[in-house]
């Protein structure tokens, strides 16, 4: 089996999978030096923690592969969560009345309105970027503040609280695997897995997915090959907005409250997740799985440092160092 | 040309990831000579030169300058020893001025330690004047034509006062007059005692300007000799190890009914009132000098630029093309001039590039099927004889000729009726060139209509059934194959009436 595995080839394999190997080293390190890290309980806890930001990171991955960016994801998560929460808040009778007026459980209406709020911002970003030909960085910088402002206006500056139990149970609920050892998988994890599989399928198997790589790789060449670049960009932003809306409303349902300030700087975590996972910031290279690994690394390191009693201030520095070193490793891999 | 050897590369070896790119190549330069370095794409010319300028490191072998061994670890090392190279893909900063670019990294200072713009502009002006070119030091490089950007690169090498100037296909983007001008400059530089390395695929140019010639083939050193001692036939034999009887294998196809017509196409400042038609089985050559508006015209037909005025008819029906997607649907496909910028997505694989133009063909109702992808790539890489490790190989790792074949494969994949090829053989080796020429004839025979834009006169004359000529955006004439000659085309390309 090891025949033909020359030193050169091993070096090449190591380089190619450097990020995955780094990830495994961190895991092994934590497994040895903490008692609680390598348990099923903790594994499912990590998955639960990664799921909401993970969905946003998947959306970001799609855009970065396309050579674009979205700075508004954190704020859009907030406004989606706030808007959805209003439909199920006992503290806001007027909205609750509206949410209950459809003849279905208002929790469903809350989910849908939260997701649609995300879609709406996706449409807004997508239209201006593709038709207005304004760089995504600038457009989404603008929509970032717009979304945040809207979140504060809708919530009147206060967390939207007293949410219906049926709504809370969506995000807080879990499938219990074992009663005694309190082993359970959070519902949000299933949403995350579904999103990852769906977007992975789209990127690999649908024409739209292939076009995302083409636009990110070389926009002019994609155009010349008959790709409707504007339409691809628009669709990608709408899809990404929708996913971010889902992430927002799920987070709120997990928190049982919708503070308008939540999701602050999540865009940075999402971008960092993509970069750490090995997605090229220049576009054209990467996959959904890269974003999964990246998001996991961020959460695991945070959690690991908590377990090792590292102060939060130091945690920030470590996170920054990891982002930069991940890109350094990646650069060496490509050169 | 002096008798003394100025620079010598001895027994150079270089491997890339297990592939031997150079197998013991030697190369010697004398002062005052123009030395042609030839070989097919992938023969190792670029690798050898990149080692000379310190961009790559040889695995073994030595370099001597005036008998002394040198060891370049960076491009700056080589530059400091008087060796500069003008790349095929220019290394200029578009949004800086000509003078800024020429003096980039070595801007002159005045006594306040600030950049001495006055001196910079004056010196640049002097160099440009000496070259006899009409470029102003304060012009932005972005506003220059491709030909002029190249001249700026040459000006840079001159201004660096290098002893050795390596030119990688310097004429591929130049018009006849510009080539004449360049050759005059090259000759002057050689007469001043500089050594010029001239990498070219154009055999006539080698005989026109070069004193000596070195041939490489598959990383092997084949030979060095005086150009006058080597016949064209022998040169081609040395390069490809086989005879190419016919560079322009023109086959006569039956010319059928008109399939495509344009009327009064106009984009102010680029081209005006262009009308022509095209028949099935016909190859229409579009000739003209650089800046005549040929590429702009083609790109406008294909929907990459917006037409200001004019009508396009496909199979007798007036059509509205807003973007290339619409053109492809109508059966029009284009092989763009610049394969790196417009033709290919270099980061992606051969498969992804070829199939991009008509992914539908690889789909079931719901998803892209790997098997269909493989079948299609195999079919087209076979037609074009693309050399690759497998369909997942990244395009940037292919040689120039093979890259161009990928672009052509992508253009053929949607099975178009009308194919526009813009400089389809620029910068590719002799063998691939002949293959692409043969392919064009084959396409015409299948009843497809072909438009070919080319700046190479033999190509235009050798391949076209009919030639239209553009001059400064205006159509100045049309010639049938029988009446076309180099002089006739040139006359139309240079005059405005």
Image: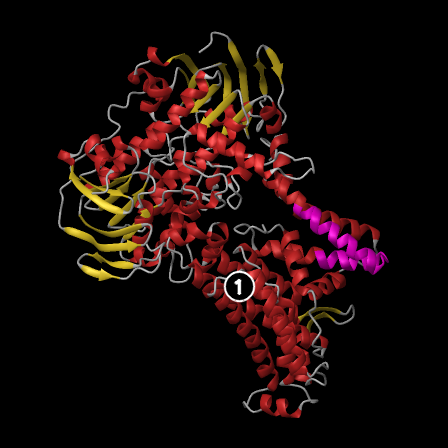
Return the x and y of residue B12 as percentages of the image width and height: 54, 18
Q: Would residue A248 be seen by someone viewing this image from the given angle?
A: no
* Residue at the spot 38% in from the left edge and 24% down from the top edge: B184
Return the x and y of residue A94 as percentages of the image width and height: 63, 92
Quadrant where the N terminus of chain A is found in the figure: top right
Q: Is residue B97 left or right of residue B488?
A: right
Q: Magenta stretch? A: A298-327
* Residue at the spot 57% in from the left edge and 27% down from the top edge: B56
Query: Which quarter of the picture shows residue B304?
Result: bottom left
B65 shown above or below A278: above
Q: What residue occupies the far top of the structure in this picture?
A: B3
Mark 1 — residue? A198
Q: Chain of mark 1?
A: A
Quadrant where the C terminus of chain A is found in the figure: top right
Q: Nearer the viewer, residue A32 or B66?
A: B66
Q: Secondary structure at mark 1?
A: helix
């Amino acid at each position: 089996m090891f025949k033909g595995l020359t030193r050169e080839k091993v070096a090449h394999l190591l380089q190619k999978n450097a990020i995955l190997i780094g990830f495994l080293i961190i895991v092994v390190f934590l497994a040895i030096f903490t008692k609680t890290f390598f348990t099923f309980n903790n594994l499912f806890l990590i998955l639960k923690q990664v799921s909401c930001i993970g969905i946003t990171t998947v959306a970001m991955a799609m855009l970065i592969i396309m050579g674009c960016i979205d700075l508004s994801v954190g704020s859009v998560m907030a406004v989606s969560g706030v808007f959805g929460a209003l439909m199920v808040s006992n503290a806001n009778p007027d909205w609750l009345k509206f949410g209950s007026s459809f003849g279905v459980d208002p929790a469903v209406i809350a989910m849908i309105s939260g997701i649609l709020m995300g879609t709406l911002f996706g449409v807004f970003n997508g239209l201006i970027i593709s038709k207005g030909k304004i760089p995504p960085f600038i457009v989404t910088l603008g929509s970032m503040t717009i979304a945040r402002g809207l979140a504060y206006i809708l919530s009147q500056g206060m967390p939207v609280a007293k949410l219906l139990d049926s709504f809370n149970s969506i995000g807080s609920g879990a499938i219990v695997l074992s009663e005694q050892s309190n082993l359970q998988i959070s519902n949000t994890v299933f949403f995350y897995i579904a999103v990852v599989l769906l977007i992975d399928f789209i990127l690999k198997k649908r024409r739209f997915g292939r076009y995302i790589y083409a636009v990110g790789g070389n926009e002019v060449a994609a155009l010349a090959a008959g790709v409707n670049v504007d339409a691809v960009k628009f669709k990608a932003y709408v899809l990404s907005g929708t996913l971010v809306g889902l992430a927002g409303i799920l987070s709120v349902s997990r928190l049982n409250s919708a503070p308008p300030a939540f999701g602050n700087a999540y865009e940075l975590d999402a971008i960092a997740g993509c970069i750490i996972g090995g997605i090229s910031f220049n576009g054209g290279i990467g996959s959904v799985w890269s974003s999964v690994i990246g998001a996991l690394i961020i959460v695991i390191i945070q959690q690991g440092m908590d377990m090792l009693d590292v102060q939060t201030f130091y945690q920030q520095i470590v996170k920054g160092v990891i982002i930069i070193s991940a890109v350094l490793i990646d650069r060496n891999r490509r050169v | 040309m002096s008798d003394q050897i100025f620079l010598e590369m001895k027994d150079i070896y270089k491997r890339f990831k297990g592939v031997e790119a150079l197998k013991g190549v030697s190369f010697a330069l004398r002062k005052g000579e123009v030395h042609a370095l030839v070989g097919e794409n992938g023969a190792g010319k670029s690798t050898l030169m990149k080692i000379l300028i310190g961009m790559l490191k040889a695995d073994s072998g030595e370099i001597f300058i005036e008998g002394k061994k040198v060891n370049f670890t960076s491009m700056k090392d080589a530059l400091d020893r008087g060796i500069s190279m003008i790349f095929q893909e220019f290394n200029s900063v578009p949004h800086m001025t000509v003078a800024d670019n020429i003096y980039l990294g070595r801007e002159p200072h005045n006594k306040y330690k600030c950049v001495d713009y006055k001196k910079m502009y004056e010196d640049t002006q002097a160099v440009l004047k000496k070259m006899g070119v009409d470029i102003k030091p304060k012009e932005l490089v972005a506003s220059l034509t491709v030909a002029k950007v190249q001249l700026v690169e040459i000006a840079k090498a001159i201004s660096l006062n290098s002893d050795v100037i390596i030119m990688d296909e310097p004429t591929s983007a130049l018009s006849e007059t510009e080539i004449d001008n360049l050759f005059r400059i090259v000759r002057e530089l050689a007469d001043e005692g500089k050594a010029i390395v001239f990498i070219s695929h154009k055999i006539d140019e080698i005989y026109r300007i070069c004193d000596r010639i070195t041939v490489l083939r598959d990383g092997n050193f084949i030979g060095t000799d005086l150009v006058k001692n080597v016949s064209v036939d022998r040169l081609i034999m040395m390069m490809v190890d086989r005879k190419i009887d016919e560079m322009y294998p023109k086959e006569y196809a039956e010319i059928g009914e008109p399939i495509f017509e344009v009327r009064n196409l106009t984009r102010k400042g680029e081209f005006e009132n262009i009308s022509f038609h095209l028949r099935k089985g016909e190859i229409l050559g579009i000739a003209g000098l650089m800046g005549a508006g040929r590429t702009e015209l083609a790109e406008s037909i294909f929907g990459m630029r917006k037409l200001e005025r004019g009508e396009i008819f496909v199979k007798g029906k007036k059509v509205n093309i807003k973007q290339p997607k619409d053109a492809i649907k109508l059966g029009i496909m284009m092989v763009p001039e610049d394969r790196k910028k417009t033709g290919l997505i270099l980061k992606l694989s051969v498969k992804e590039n070829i199939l991009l133009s008509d992914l539908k063909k690889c789909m079931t109702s719901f998803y892209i099927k790997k098997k269909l992808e493989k079948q299609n790539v195999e079919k087209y890489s076979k037609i074009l004889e693309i050399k690759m490790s497998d369909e997942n190989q990244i395009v940037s790792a292919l040689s120039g000729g093979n890259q161009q074949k990928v672009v052509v494969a992508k253009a053929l994949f949607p099975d178009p009726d009308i194919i526009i090829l813009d400089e389809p053989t620029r910068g590719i080796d002799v063998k691939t060139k002949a293959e692409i020429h043969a392919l064009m004839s084959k396409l015409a025979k299948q009843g497809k209509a072909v438009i070919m834009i080319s700046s190479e006169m033999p190509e235009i004359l050798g391949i076209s059934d009919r030639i239209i000529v553009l001059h400064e955006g205006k159509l100045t004439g049309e010639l049938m194959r029988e009446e076309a000659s180099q002089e006739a085309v040139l006359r139309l390309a240079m005059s405005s009436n």
